[in-house]
Image: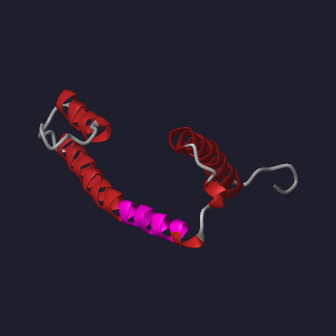
């Protein structure tokens, strides 16, 4: 902040890291309640193995997120072209955004 004016990148950075802090604390505390462990007492190999597992999850999540975003883009293009109406487009987008994974038995 210079001269009392917040620059756009400063506001964006503040938003990113404020949300990350709040979300991170919530996740950390939830993990503690679930596992009842002293997370900070683990050894380096435990951290490394868990970090690798989380990184592999992130690859899978990003893969499917890209697919979902392309489905939303496709729906928007169909709406613009008049191929589907607003109700159908809205339902498609809501479905893409709100669904949870189905179970193997479904």
Decide: is 78 above or below 50: above
Image quadrant where residue 70 sits: bottom left
Quadrant containing the C terminus in the rendered view: top left
Q: Is residue 88 left or right of residue 99?
A: left
Main structural element of the magenta stretch: helix, strand or loop?
Answer: helix
Of residues 85 and 90, the one drawn nearer to the viewer in this rendering: 90
Q: Is residue 49 magenta?
A: yes
Give the residue furthest to the top.
Answer: 87
Image spot of residue 96 (x, y percent): 26, 41
Horizontal side of 19 relative to 3 (left or right) equals left
Is 56 colored magenta in this rendering?
Answer: yes
Nearest the camera: 66 or 43? 43
State whether residue 95 is above or below residue 51. above
- Most foreground residue, 53 or 60: 53
Counting labels gives 0
Q: How is the image coloured?
A: secondary structure
**Image quadrant occupied by the N terminus:** bottom right
Residue at 21 percent across and 44 percent down: it is 75
Which x, y percent locates residue 52?
44, 69
Q: In percent of the image, x 66 and y 55: which residue is there?
A: 13
The magenta region covers: 46-58
Query: Percent position (x, y) of residue 12?
Result: 64, 52
Residue at the (20%, 40%) spot, across then down = 102
- Classify residue 99 by image quadrant: top left
Give percent across and percent down for residue 30.
Answer: 55, 39
């Amino acid at each position: 902040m210079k001269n009392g004016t917040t620059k756009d990148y400063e506001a964006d950075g503040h938003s990113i890291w404020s949300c990350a802090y709040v979300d991170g604390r919530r996740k950390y505390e939830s993990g503690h309640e679930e596992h009842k462990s002293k997370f900070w007492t683990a050894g380096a190999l435990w951290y490394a193995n868990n970090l690798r597992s989380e990184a592999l999850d992130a690859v899978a999540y990003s893969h499917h997120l890209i697919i979902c975003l392309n489905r939303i883009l496709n729906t928007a293009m169909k709406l613009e072209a008049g191929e589907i109406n607003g109700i159908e487009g809205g339902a498609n987008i809501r479905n893409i955004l709100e669904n949870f994974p189905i179970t193997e038995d479904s």
